Image: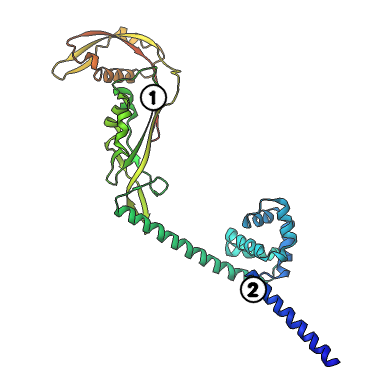
């Protein structure tokens, strides 16, 4: 009878062992390096430190307060969450400070040593994954360069820099009507040698005369003093890149316009085929408006005269009336110009 009892106990123990092994295998989980004792220390530490609680939640992507409390209260059943928390401590504080945090948590030197070893292994794995991703990204870049492809702004390590002369645009546009707000954007490509062109040249079919003048005279051509670049093997490589050039009026209404009719006498230099204004004292007195930049007004008026098709065929001296107003232009590649 005694022999049967011993045999029965042995059979039960074996059955329990097999059942535990089967359960562990079905769960597909490796044994955690975090012990129940370590989990208990982590639980106490989190409840006495709001920062630790926040790090725990962030490491495990927990957004619900109820779920957070439940997980920390039953941490011995969520040892993987404890692992992520301990690794997050080291990634946040580094080796020396991380050691101090774990020591304050109540972990023994041996337990801390185990955590540090796991952090080093995880750091190596993370670095290896990052290196693999970097190589894959650079391989894709090299293929796109070989195909003479175009890179997006998000792919660039160095953004292109373009020379947009807003002052020239404001002075020399063939038509600058007060009632028409300037608001133009140009989807362009900056080639690796600095030449700017539209992504789709057919866009010009819908352009107004003003848009065409801006694109042809102030954007198109070798107009990039720094081209877009991508980083390959720690080197900045020039590439073709997409760029949006946005030129717009800063104010919808002319808040500071002169809005007065000004009278001028103009003279044509026949030899240079160039119109200029005959400035005199009465001209200057008319400037007692809201004009803070008299020289700027002179330059813009001269530029407008020599780009005005209506007076190109005229000769000798003329008398003209001008409606002067101020407008402010902005561009994502230039400073604001009034």
Quadrant in the picture for residue 159: top left
* Discs 2, 1 touching: Cβ within 8 Å: no
Quadrant in the picture for residue 204: top left
Q: Quadrant of the N terminus?
A: bottom right
Looking at the image, the residue that sits furthest to the left is 271
Residue 311 falls left or right of residue 245: left
| Secondary structure of residue under mark 1 | loop
Query: Quick check: can you spot residue 214?
Result: no
Labelled disc at residue 25: 2
Query: Quick check: can you spot residue 325?
Result: yes
Residue 319, horizontal then vertical, whole percent? 25, 7
Residue 128 falls left or right of residue 24: left
Q: Reading the chain from its start, which is encountered first: label 2 or label 1?
A: 2
Of 231 and 209, which appears nearest the observer?
A: 209
Residue 15, horizontal then vertical, whole percent? 74, 80
| Secondary structure of residue under mark 2 | helix
Q: Quadrant of the C terminus?
A: top left
Q: Residues within 10 Å of mark 1 (few under 14, many from 20)?
A: many
| Figure check: 120 above or below 244 | below
How far apart in space, not on screen, are marks 2 and 1 (Cα)?
69 Å
Residue 161, horizontal then vertical, whole percent? 35, 41
Q: How is the image coloured?
A: rainbow
Residue holding disc 1: 182
| Figure check: 139 above or below 287 | below
């Amino acid at each position: 009878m005694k022999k049967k009892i011993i045999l029965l106990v042995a059979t039960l123990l074996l059955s329990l062992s097999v059942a535990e092994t089967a359960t562990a295998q079905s769960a597909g989980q490796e044994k955690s390096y975090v012990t129940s004792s370590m989990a208990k220390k982590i639980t106490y530490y989190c409840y006495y430190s709001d920062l630790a609680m926040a790090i725990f939640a962030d490491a495990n992507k927990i957004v619900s307060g109820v779920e957070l409390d439940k997980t920390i209260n039953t941490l011995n059943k969520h040892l993987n969450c404890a692992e992520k928390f301990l690794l997050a401590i080291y990634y946040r504080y580094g080796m020396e400070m991380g050691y101090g945090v774990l020591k304050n948590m109540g972990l023994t030197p041996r337990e801390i040593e185990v955590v540090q070893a796991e952090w080093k292994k995880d750091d190596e794995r993370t670095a290896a994954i990052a290196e693999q991703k970097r190589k894959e990204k650079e391989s894709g870049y090299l293929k796109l360069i070989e195909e003479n492809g175009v890179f997006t702004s998000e792919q660039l390590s160095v953004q292109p820099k373009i020379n947009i002369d807003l002052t020239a645009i404001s002075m020399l546009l063939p038509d600058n009507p007060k009632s028409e707000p300037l608001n133009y954007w140009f989807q362009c490509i900056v080639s690796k040698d600095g030449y700017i062109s539209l992504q789709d040249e057919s866009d010009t079919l819908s352009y107004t005369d003003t848009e065409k003048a801006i694109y042809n005279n102030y954007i198109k051509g070798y107009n990039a003093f720094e081209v877009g670049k991508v980083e390959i093997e720690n080197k900045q490589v020039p590439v073709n890149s997409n760029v949006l050039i946005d030129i717009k009026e800063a104010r919808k209404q002319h808040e500071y316009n002169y809005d007065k009719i000004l009278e001028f006498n103009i003279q044509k230099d026949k030899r240079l085929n160039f119109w200029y204004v005959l400035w005199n004292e009465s001209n200057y007195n008319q400037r007692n408006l809201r004009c803070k930049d008299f020289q700027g007004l002179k330059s813009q008026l001269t530029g407008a005269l020599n780009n005005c098709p209506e007076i190109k065929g005229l000769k000798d001296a003329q008398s003209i009336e001008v409606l002067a107003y101020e407008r402010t232009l902005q561009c994502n590649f230039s400073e604001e110009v009034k």
